[in-house]
């Protein structure tokens, strides 16, 4: 048996560690099919770690995957923390105590909708450092991180000292433009080996590019992330293809991320997956300033304080219906044991037809020792019939002889075909079972289903009536007692007697959720002057990171002359900017680096300019459409310009492309007529500006390629891809030859172009408030006066409120109700999170309108900031809800 890690000199024989081959995962105790749930210590209070781990184990899952966020542990350059909620070693030890394996994912990049994908913000201060590249400066910083993290993992590897069964290097590198994948992954692999990692090293592909994820580096096992449409009929053939590709390398299919719905997970299992790890089955929270800015379809989407994509456990710990589905699937896996763990995927030789929507190419597994497991997904909403029409694999005997079997809607029963019954103490063959087998013993088979169950033992066919709660269906065949339980009873099955009597645990009582509590009283602090650290005078606005603010906010102040100026141009501002010009606060800017025009016609002469810039998350995904969404992009005010002149430059562009001849025709930008729709056309003209300038392309729909060359020296040129989200090109003073290339689109309406002559606004005074300073101010005792809500605030005005909390066993959800306010909460000496009420950017994740105060995190303090907008800034009321409501 070849093994992917033997090139590293690792001993991974089954009796000493983890072995991987095309048939699956072999542990010291034998082969296992692994169900794995994401559970992140950094998104939960430490006091809840054990309970959440135990909850995962009770679901039937045997493993958790956990990221280790680099910037959670290196809080500032060279300042490391592994205490309290950062004590990842204690978390791993608890996982072992709760009987769980661990797949550790130390990055260095993790994505996870986490601030910067866990890459420290200050890496971007070195312009020569290239993140996620085979580049010395970056790898030096990675070495410092791995020197901290990898020894913790090496000390806790399975089976000798802990639960860690695999270590993932990087994360979905195939999404990223890495110039030397082989060199980069080799460097990470070598560091892992140097630190004594002997369990398999894996690297996951986000879009099926195995080489792109691993660099085809020896000793790095490819894994796959699948996020299909749960209702797609085409999941199975895609997954089987990767199972076959990996089997050619004598490797199993490891699915390190996928959807959370168990109907889909069953389809993945039947298609050959040996590890199934639905992402974020157990949800959590983005505390403080840790959420990222991402793309998620529309640029500039922010992650909410709640981190929840509908997994089987909510952010507050509530078990959802999928939790029971997990327990049911786990019972099937446990019942079949090694026979399933060593199974191999196939296209079933038992074809079936259905009267309901199902897979376009169903999957089955050849079980070790004989027989077939056949997945029959019902993708509809009404109960239907599946009719078998063929013979079983390898036996040549009739399987169902056209007999119909019932299949519940929105289900995927794992049917057994031609399975020898010897391991369960019965001579004979289970020719067909149309429902999940959830328990088997000498003389007894127990199935779970909501509809009648068809069972064929040998040649004897019986139908077990559909069970009801507390009343199993029963039948006998060939000396076997056959029992059918409802899924709810099946997951509470505790024992089965030889006569078929089943012992079912009583359901837990359901506690009624208390009604929300309205809070209208708070203590408003008298002193609202938050200390700020002076950060010097600067010609142009510096980035917040260069001022030592990696999470938090900063203030920029200057005075500028607006005589004869109608508008300002703000370039590169991120994340959230409250800009005040001449005493008037403008609507909050959340453009993530996109260029913004600001009307200032009401201002004249020398005026004061102030900008408060808040970091709401560094990009976790490399999105080229907006400057601040590039991985590693820094935060701050950007550059503010006065617009001295605006000139329309839409005309007099020479046309190159299609049949345009010489001399080149002159047309308006985008105005060339051709029948060759979609073929690129290039428009060129010279543009001169005596000052710095910005070229604005109005009407951009599809991305446009723009090249800027020095028209006098005919040498240097820069190329830009201009998007609808940010249709601007910066220009220095001088004469430039501009070329705009766009696909010919006669119904697109054409483009307009204007040139803005600019002067920079200079001489800025800066101050900084990082998260440590803000937290210290928020958590110190301070005098206050009682106020009654509603509370109205002017744009830019802040109020610090201390709120009394009632006792709570499960924690509290705080839901601010109001308009045009941003609310940050602190409790238990830590920033809980932030909520934005009113006009705001898009949010993803969990409920973006609540703050969670964990049990025991007392003394709630809120910072409420008014934002300019179409409505007045007002905090009307605070609603407190039980976390289990």
Image (cartoon, rainbow, N blue to C red):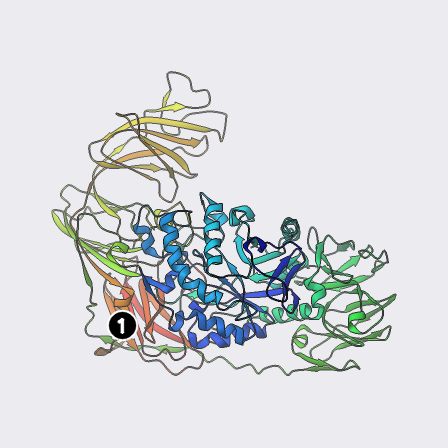
Placement of 884 over or under 262, stated as above or below: below
For the point 78% across and 73% down, the residue is: 424
137 or 399, which lies in front?
Answer: 137
Determine which quarter of the picture holds residue 548: bottom left
604 or 776, which lies in front?
Answer: 776
For the point 30% across and 27% down, the residue is: 715
Where residue 136 sits: x, y (%)?
Answer: 37, 48
Kindly state the secondary structure of the residue where label 1 is placed.
Answer: helix
Determine which quarter of the picture holds residue 734: top left
479 or 14, which lies in front?
Answer: 14
Q: Is residue 634 left or right of residue 213?
A: left
Circle 1 residue: 778
Q: Kindly give the residue lying farthest to the top in the view shown.
A: 662
Q: Is residue 133 left or right of residue 758?
A: right
Where residue 453 sits: x, y (%)?
Answer: 77, 69
Placement of 579 over or under 862, stated as above or below: above
Asked if residue 860 shows in the view, the reply is yes
Placement of 755 over or under 131, stated as above or below: above
Q: Is residue 348 left or right of residue 560?
A: right
Disc 1 crowd rating (10 Å Cα; few below 14, some 14-19, many 20+) is: many
Where residue 690 sits: x, y (%)?
Answer: 20, 32
Where residue 777 sits: x, y (%)?
Answer: 24, 71
């Amino acid at each position: 048996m070849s093994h992917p890690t033997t090139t590293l000199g690792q001993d991974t024989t089954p009796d000493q560690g983890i072995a991987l081959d095309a048939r699956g995962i072999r542990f010291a105790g034998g082969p296992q099919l692994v169900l794995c749930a994401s559970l992140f210590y950094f998104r939960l209070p430490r006091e809840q770690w054990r309970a959440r781990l135990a909850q995962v184990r009770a679901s039937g899952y045997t493993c958790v995957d956990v990221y280790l966020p680099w910037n959670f542990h290196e809080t500032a350059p060279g300042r490391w923390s592994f205490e309290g909620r950062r004590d990842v070693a204690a978390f791993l030890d608890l996982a072992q105590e709760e009987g769980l394996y661990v797949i550790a994912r130390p990055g260095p990049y993790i994505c996870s909708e986490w601030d910067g994908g866990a890459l420290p913000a200050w890496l971007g201060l070195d312009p020569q450092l290239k993140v996620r590249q085979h580049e010395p400066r970056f790898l030096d910083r990675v070495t410092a991180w791995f020197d901290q993290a990898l020894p913790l993992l090496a000390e806790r590897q399975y089976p000798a000292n802990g639960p860690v069964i695999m270590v993932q290097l990087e994360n979905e590198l195939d999404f990223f433009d890495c110039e030397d994948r082989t060199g980069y992954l080799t460097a990470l692999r070598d560091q892992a080996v140097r630190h004594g990692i002997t369990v398999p090293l894996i690297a996951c592909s986000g879009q099926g590019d195995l080489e792109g994820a691993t660099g085809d580096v020896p000793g790095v096992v490819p894994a796959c992330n699948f996020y299909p449409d749960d209702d797609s009929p085409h999941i199975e053939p895609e997954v089987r293809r990767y199972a076959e590709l990996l089997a050619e390398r004598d490797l199993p299919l490891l699915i390190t991320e996928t959807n959370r719905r168990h109907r889909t997970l069953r389809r993945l299992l039947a298609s050959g997956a040996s590890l199934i790890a639905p992402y974020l089955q157990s949800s959590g929270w983005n505390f403080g300033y840790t959420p990222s800015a991402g793309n998620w379809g529309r640029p500039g989407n922010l992650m909410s304080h709640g981190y929840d994509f509908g997994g089987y456990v909510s952010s507050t710990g509530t078990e959802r219906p999928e939790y029971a589905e997990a327990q049911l699937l786990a019972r099937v896996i446990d019942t079949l044991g090694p026979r399933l763990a060593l199974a191999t995927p196939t296209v079933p030789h038992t074809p079936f037809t259905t009267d309901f929507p199902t897979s376009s190419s169903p999957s089955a597994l050849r079980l070790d020792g004989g027989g077939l497991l056949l997945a029959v997904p019902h993708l509809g909403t009404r109960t239907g019939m599946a009719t078998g029409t063929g013979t079983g694999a390898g036996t040549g005997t009739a399987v169902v002889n056209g007999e119909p079997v019932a299949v519940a809607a929105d289900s995927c029963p794992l049917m057994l075909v031609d399975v020898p019954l010897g391991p369960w103490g019965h001579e004979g063959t289970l020719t067909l079972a149309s429902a999940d087998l959830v328990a088997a013993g000498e003389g007894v088979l127990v199935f779970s289903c909501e509809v009648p169950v068809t069972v064929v033992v040998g040649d004897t066919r019986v139908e077990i009536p559909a069970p009801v709660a507390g009343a199993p269906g029963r039948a006998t065949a060939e000396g076997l007692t056959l029992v059918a339980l409802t899924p709810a009873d099946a997951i509470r099955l505790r024992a089965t007697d030889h006569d078929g009597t089943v012992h079912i645990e009583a359901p837990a009582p359901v506690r009624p959720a208390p009604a929300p509590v309205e809070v209208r009283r708070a203590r408003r602090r008298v002193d609202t002057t938050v200390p700020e650290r002076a950060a010097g005078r600067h010609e142009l606005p510096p980035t917040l990171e260069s001022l030592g603010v990696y999470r938090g906010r900063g203030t920029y102040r200057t005075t500028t002359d607006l005589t004869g100026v109608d508008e300002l141009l703000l370039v590169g501002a991120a994340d959230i900017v409250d800009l005040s010009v001449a005493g008037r606060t403008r609507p909050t800017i959340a453009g993530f680096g996109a260029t913004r025009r600001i009307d200032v016609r009401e201002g004249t002469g020398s005026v004061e300019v102030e900008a408060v810039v808040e970091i709401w998350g560094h990009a976790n995904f490399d999105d080229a459409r907006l400057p601040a969404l590039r991985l590693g992009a820094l935060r701050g005010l950007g550059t503010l310009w006065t617009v001295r002149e605006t000139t329309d430059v839409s005309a007099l562009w020479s046309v190159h492309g299609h049949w345009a001849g010489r001399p080149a025709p002159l047309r308006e930008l985008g105005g060339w007529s051709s029948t060759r729709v979609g073929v690129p056309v290039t428009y060129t003209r010279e543009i001169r500006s005596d000052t710095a300038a910005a070229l604005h392309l109005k009407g951009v729909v599809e991305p446009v390629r723009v090249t800027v060359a020095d028209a006098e020296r005919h040498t240097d040129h820069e190329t830009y891809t201009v998007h609808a989200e940010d249709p601007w090109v910066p220009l220095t003073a001088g004469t430039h030859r501009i070329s705009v290339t766009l696909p010919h689109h006669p119904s697109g309406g054409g483009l307009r172009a204007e040139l803005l002559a600019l002067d920079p606004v200079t001489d800025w005074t800066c101050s900084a408030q990082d998260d440590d300073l803000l937290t210290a101010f928020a958590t110190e005792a301070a005098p206050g006066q009682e106020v009654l809500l509603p509370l109205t605030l002017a744009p830019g005005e802040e109020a610090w409120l201390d709120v009394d909390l009632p006792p709570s066993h499960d924690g509290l959800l705080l839901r601010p109700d109001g308009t045009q306010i941003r609310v940050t909460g602190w409790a238990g000496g830590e920033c809980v999170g932030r909520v934005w009420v009113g006009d705001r950017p898009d949010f993803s994740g969990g409920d973006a309108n609540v703050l969670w105060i964990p049990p025991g995190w007392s003394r709630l303090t809120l910072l409420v900031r008014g934002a300019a907008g179409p409505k007045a800034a007002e905090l009307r009321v605070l609603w407190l809800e039980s976390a289990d409501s």
